[in-house]
Image (tube, rainbow, N blue to C red):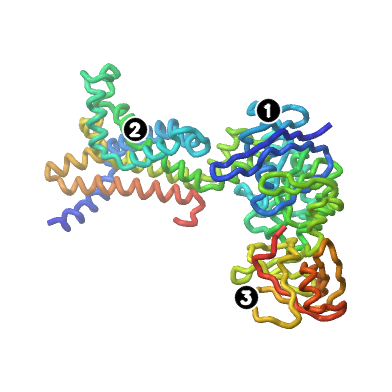
């Protein structure tokens, strides 16, 4: 039964992709949009934060690094539940009306992936010699210009951080379920749709959606590898 | 007017004191900084370059104390060259232009300067090469060109030739002699010959403090080392550095490559009439060429291809019945060889 479901899933996935099925396209684009916006938010906050943590000496720096490292693996349902309580109508942030919206899901995912963004960028920067900073400074770079130069030198590590962050947001289920509730045409994304179709016994469609999910992740990683110079593609 | 004035400059790292209470005034004469590894040379240079901040004391640059608001001014006028050259990803031109682009210099002017800088280090036509594909010597010459592109008031060099072959080292030394008339050159090095060629003033650092300073030819710390100072090319084999000095090879346990100066203390050398079975890695034979006596201590010069001064007591000298011209053996441990 299961092998048959997989092969049916593959042919169904091909059919849905080739026929550009409207519902599937809509769900896929909503997934991309939600995770993309989450990655953007996480980068806007995480990038400067990582630069400060990696390149400045201040008390509590190691504790902060430890916290971000530990939160990399935070269970999505736990965070989802926590955010649900905060955002629900009667919760402290209920007035922001973010519950059951794509924006709310994005913000939730951004919080989820921020530790990945920060931890990965910090290690990318730290993998570059401290002497690199001395070099740019002695050539006259300001602290800001030095950070830019170091980020550019750590480019492949930084882009890996962003891709990993996006992947985690794109493939997670807990927050999308808790904050989005899988409302058809509103907050349904690939992962919540897969969970729903599976519970309905529609294994073929579930596999089709899963293959689309995998395909997007693979394609994205391939493109990034190519952009990095392609030596490891 | 002095370029730098250091008052009670101290640098504490959590593990150790790197500099202790340095007081010094530097004018624009070329300065050599000598001392063993770990004596504080690099730390001193990094503070002068504005790359590290002292834990105590004051650094004045052109009459103004350096502090966080003025450190950028210091960094824009003082450029440091490191022992192992480091590059930003990209070709030679990208690296040479980096500092000037930061300063907002027009591309036309940068292009003009690029040609001059490459010519200065005799690497014309290297502009489009990837820095990763250059030899060590070429890399250090490009690093020098990159610093000189900025026309800095002060050029700091931290053992710039210690990893280089003699040809590249001498190209760099020649450029530095030339440049020292245009800007203040401060060089930390183990190569005493290089110091003598470049520097007009020398300081000797020991455990983070200046123990001697003066003219490189007169300096007592160098005088102290003129006995048994040898300069040669070192290669590392099985964890032991072999330094070719003239016809002989001196073995030392300090890992070093490139051109180095070594010192062996006269009291660390054992003199024997015959070849002895010993764990000492250095053993040579040659005739006695001189005998000097000072305060009951006898210094004997032995020519084994290089002249070694060996210190023995008056009593040993009498008992061994040594005579001028008589061939003897000398031996000393690899760990007794002090890299300068």
Which chain is home to disc 2? A
Q: Residues within 10 Å of mark 3 (few under 14, many from 20)?
A: few
Q: Residue A112 location, x and y as percent?
A: 32, 36
Q: Chain of mark 1?
A: B
Specify whether disc 3 shares its chain with disc 2: no
Q: CA distance from mark 1 to mark 3?
A: 56 Å
Quick check: B53 left or right of B316?
left
Asked if residue B94 shows in the view, the reply is no
The picture quadrant where one finds residue B333 is: bottom right
> Looking at the figure, which quarter contains the N terminus of chain A?
bottom left
Q: Which residue is mark 1?
A: B70
Q: Secondary structure at mark 3?
A: loop
Q: Is residue B262 above or below residue A95?
A: below
- Taking the image as shown, residue A36 lies to the left or right of residue A188, namely right
Label 2 SS: helix
Q: Secondary structure at mark 1?
A: loop
Of badges 2 and 1, the one in the foreground is: 1
* Mark 1 or mark 3, earlier in chain: 1
Name the residue carrying label 3. B279
Task: Give the image quarter of residue B314.
Answer: bottom right
Q: Nearer the viewer, residue B186 or A99?
A: B186
Of residues A195 and A66, which is closer to you in this image? Answer: A66
Q: Nearer the viewer, mark 3 or mark 2?
A: 3
Q: Is residue B337 above or below residue A25?
A: below
Residue at numbered disc 2: A111
Q: Are marks 2 and 1 in contact (CB under 8 Å)?
A: no
The quarter of the picture where the C terminus of chain A appears is bottom left
The chain that hosts pointer 3 is B
């Amino acid at each position: 039964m299961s092998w048959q479901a997989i092969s049916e899933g593959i042919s169904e996935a091909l059919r849905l992709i080739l026929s550009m099925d409207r519902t599937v396209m809509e769900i896929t684009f909503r997934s991309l949009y939600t995770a993309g916006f989450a990655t953007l938010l996480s980068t806007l906050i995480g990038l400067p934060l990582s630069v400060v943590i990696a390149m400045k000496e201040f008390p509590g720096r190691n504790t902060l690094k430890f916290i971000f490292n530990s939160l990399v693996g935070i269970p999505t349902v736990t965070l989802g539940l926590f955010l649900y309580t905060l955002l629900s109508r009667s919760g402290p942030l209920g007035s922001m009306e973010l519950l059951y919206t794509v924006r709310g899901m994005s913000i939730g995912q951004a919080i989820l992936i921020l530790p990945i963004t920060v931890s990965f960028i910090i290690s990318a920067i730290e993998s570059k010699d401290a002497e690199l900073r001395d070099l740019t400074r002695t050539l006259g770079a300001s602290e800001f210009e030095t950070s830019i130069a170091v980020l550019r030198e750590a480019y492949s590590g930084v882009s890996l951080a962003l891709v990993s962050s996006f992947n985690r947001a794109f493939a997670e289920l807990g927050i999308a379920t808790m904050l989005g509730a899988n409302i058809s045409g509103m907050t349904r994304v690939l992962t919540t749709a897969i969970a729903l179709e599976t519970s309905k016994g529609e294994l073929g469609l579930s596999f089709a959606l899963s293959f689309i999910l995998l395909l997007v992740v693979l394609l994205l990683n391939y493109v990034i590898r190519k952009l990095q110079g392609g030596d490891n593609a | 007017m002095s370029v730098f004035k250091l008052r009670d400059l101290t640098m504490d790292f959590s593990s150790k004191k790197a500099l202790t209470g340095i007081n010094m005034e530097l004018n624009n004469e070329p300065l050599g900084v000598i001392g063993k590894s770990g004596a504080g040379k690099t730390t001193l240079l990094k503070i002068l370059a504005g790359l590290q901040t002292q834990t105590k004391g004051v650094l004045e640059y052109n009459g103004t104390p350096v502090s966080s608001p003025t450190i950028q001014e210091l960094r824009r006028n003082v450029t440091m060259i490191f022992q192992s050259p480091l590059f930003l990803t990209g070709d030679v031109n990208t690296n040479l232009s980096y500092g000037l682009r930061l300063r907002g210099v027009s591309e036309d002017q940068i292009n003009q300067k690029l040609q001059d800088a490459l010519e200065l280090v005799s690497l014309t036509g290297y502009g489009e090469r990837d820095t990763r594909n250059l030899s060590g010597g070429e890399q250090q010459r490009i690093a020098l060109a990159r610093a000189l592109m900025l026309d800095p008031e002060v050029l700091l060099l931290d053992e710039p030739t210690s990893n280089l072959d003699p040809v590249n080292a001498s190209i760099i030394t020649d450029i530095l002699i030339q440049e020292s008339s245009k800007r203040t050159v401060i060089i930390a090095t183990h190569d005493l010959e290089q110091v003598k060629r470049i520097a007009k003033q020398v300081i000797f650092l020991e455990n983070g403090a200046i123990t001697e300073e003066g003219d490189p030819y007169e300096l007592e710390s160098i005088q102290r080392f003129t006995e048994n100072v040898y300069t040669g090319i070192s290669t590392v084999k099985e964890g032991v550095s072999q330094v070719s000095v003239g016809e002989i090879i001196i073995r030392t346990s300090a890992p070093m490559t490139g051109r180095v100066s070594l010192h062996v203390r006269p009291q660390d050398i054992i003199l024997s009439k015959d070849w002895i079975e010993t764990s000492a890695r250095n053993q040579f034979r040659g005739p006695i060429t001189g005998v000097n006596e000072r305060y009951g201590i006898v210094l004997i010069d032995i020519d084994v291809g290089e002249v070694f001064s060996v210190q023995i007591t008056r009593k040993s000298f009498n008992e061994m019945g040594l005579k001028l011209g008589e061939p003897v053996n000398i031996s000393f441990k690899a760990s007794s060889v002090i890299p300068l």
